[in-house]
Image (cartoon, grey):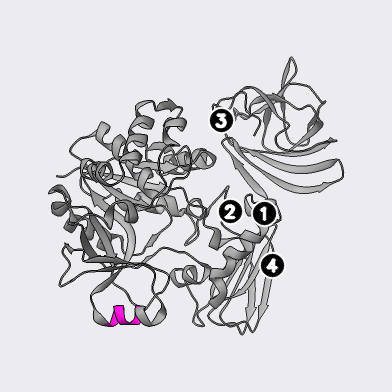
Amino acid sequence: MIPVTPVILSGGSGTRLWPASRAAYPKQLLPMVASGETMLQQTAARAAPLDGAAAPIVVCNEAHRFMVAEQLHAIGLDPTIILEPEGRNTAPAVALAAIAAQRRDDDSLILVMPADHVIKDVAAFAAAVERGMDAAVSGHLVTFGIRPDSAHTGYGYIQAEPTGDGPVPVLSFKEKPARDVAEDYVASGRYLWNSGMFLFRPDRYLDAILRFEPDMYAACEASMAVAREDLDFLRPGEKEFSESPSNSIDYAVMERVDDAMVVPLSAGWSDVGSWSSLQEVRHRDDAGNAVTGDVVQVGCSNSLISSESRLVAAVGLADHVVVETKDAVLVAPKDRAEDVKAIVDQLKLDDRPEVTFHRQVFRPWGSYDGVDQGENFQVKRLIVNPGAVLSLQLHHHRAEHWIVVQGKARITRGDEEFDLSVNESTYIPIGEKHRIANPFDAPVHIIEVQSGDYLGEDDIVRFEDNYGREGTNT
C-alpha cells in the first residue's frame, strides 16, 4: 500500500462567483453545489477513501484559518494547516506542503487538489489516482487530464495520446484557446482539459523546483526551517517566504520537465469558475433551471436563480443568473457570467466592503451579522458557539448594549462576572474591559447595539484571547 497525503490548496477568493463568494469567505468554504458540505469538505472527503490516505495538508491564508480548521474537524479530519504568509501562486504553496509531507513520511506521494473543484463520480476519481500511482512512485510528475465534453475556452489543454485510461506522456501544455482552436483540439481526440490536480513524490517535485526555480526552492526551504506551530496551524517564516518568486506549478515545473505523465479522467469534473458553470453541476428542473432558496419563478428556462435571505420572484427569464444575498443582488445573462470579475474590480476601486465581507462575518468563536446602522450607531446579531469565548477586550470609541435573545451567556464586565439569559441585558461603557463566553451546550444569540463616534472593527484592544490574537485589533 502506497501512502498518499492529500494536499489541498485553499487560497483562492472565487471572485467570479461574487456576491456569494468574497475574499473573506470564498467559494471553497461555502456549500456552493449542495447543502450540507462545503467545497473544501467535499475535496477532503473524496481523498479520504484512497488506500493509504493520510490526514490532509491544507495550504490557506491567515484570514481563512479558523474556518478551514473548523470545517475539517467537523468531518472528523485532523489536518496540518499551513498558513501561507502571502500569496505566491501554486508552485511555492505546493513546495511548502511537499516539505511538510517529507517531514511526516518520506515514502508518501502527495495528491494536490484545489479546494474549489467539483467531482461528481468520486469512485472514478479514486480509480484514476490508483492508475497514476506506479508512475508517480517511479518519479514521474503525474497530472490528471479531463476528457472534454465541449470546446471549452476557459480551460487550458494538455496534448497527449490518451489511448486508454492509464498514464501517458504529456506532449505539451496549451493556454486557454480561442473557440475555433478549442473545437480542433476536441475533434482530434488528442487533447484533455488541464484539471490542476497532480500526483507525485514530494522529493521529485522539490528536485524539479530546485532545478528550475532555485530562488523559490531556497525561500521555501528557509521559510519551513523556521516554521512555528500556533494552535492548529503551522506558520512558515514570513520574511523568508517573501523572497520566493510567484509562479504557478504549470509554468514553474510541469511545462519544463520532460517526463510528465497525464492520466485521463472522466468523473464529472468542473472547476466551478463562474455562475454558468455552477448551474451545470447543480440540480436542475425540467426547464433547466437551478433554483435554491426562497424563489418563485414563472416561465423561466436554463437559468440559475438563488436566494439567501428573502423571496426572489422571476418571470420569463431565459439563460440568466440571479443571485441574492443579504446585502447584494447580481443579475446577468449567462453568457456574460465571466464578466462578474469586472464588477468585483469596480467594487475594489470604489473601496466597497462588499468585495471582501458578507453581511454575516465569521469569527473563530461564531459570527456576527450587521442588522442596521446609522450615524453613530450600529446593531449586530452575535452568535457565540457552545464552548467558545470572545477575547477580553475594550473599545476606546464605542459603548455596547447586549440583549440575549436565545440561549445563555457568561459576561465579564470589569471585575464582575455574571450570566445573562433570554430577555436579560447589560451595558458596557467606553473603555471597560469585557468578554462574552458560552460555557453552555447551545449557541447564544445576542443583539448588540453599539454607539459612539467611531464604530470600526479595528477599535479593539485585546488582552487575552483563546485564538492567538492577543495584541491585534482586527
- Mark 4 or mark 3, which has the lower sequence index? 4
Q: Which residue is mark 3?
A: 387
Which numbered disc, 4 or 1, marks the residue closer to the eye?
Answer: 1
x, y (%) of residue 360?
65, 48
The amino acid type found where label 2 is placed reads Arg
Nearest the eye: 386 or 381: 381
- Mark 1 or mark 3, which has the lower sequence index? 1
3D distance between C-alphas at marks 2 and 1 = 8 Å
The amino acid type found where label 3 is placed reads Gly
Task: Say if mark 1 contacts mark 3, CB within 8 Å.
Answer: no
Nearest the eye: 172 or 382: 172
- Whether 5 is among the magenta residues is no
Q: Look at the image and tell me in which quarter the C terminus lies.
A: top right
3D distance between C-alphas at marks 3 and 2 = 28 Å
3D distance between C-alphas at marks 4 and 1 = 21 Å
Which numbered disc, 4 or 2, marks the residue closer to the eye?
Answer: 2
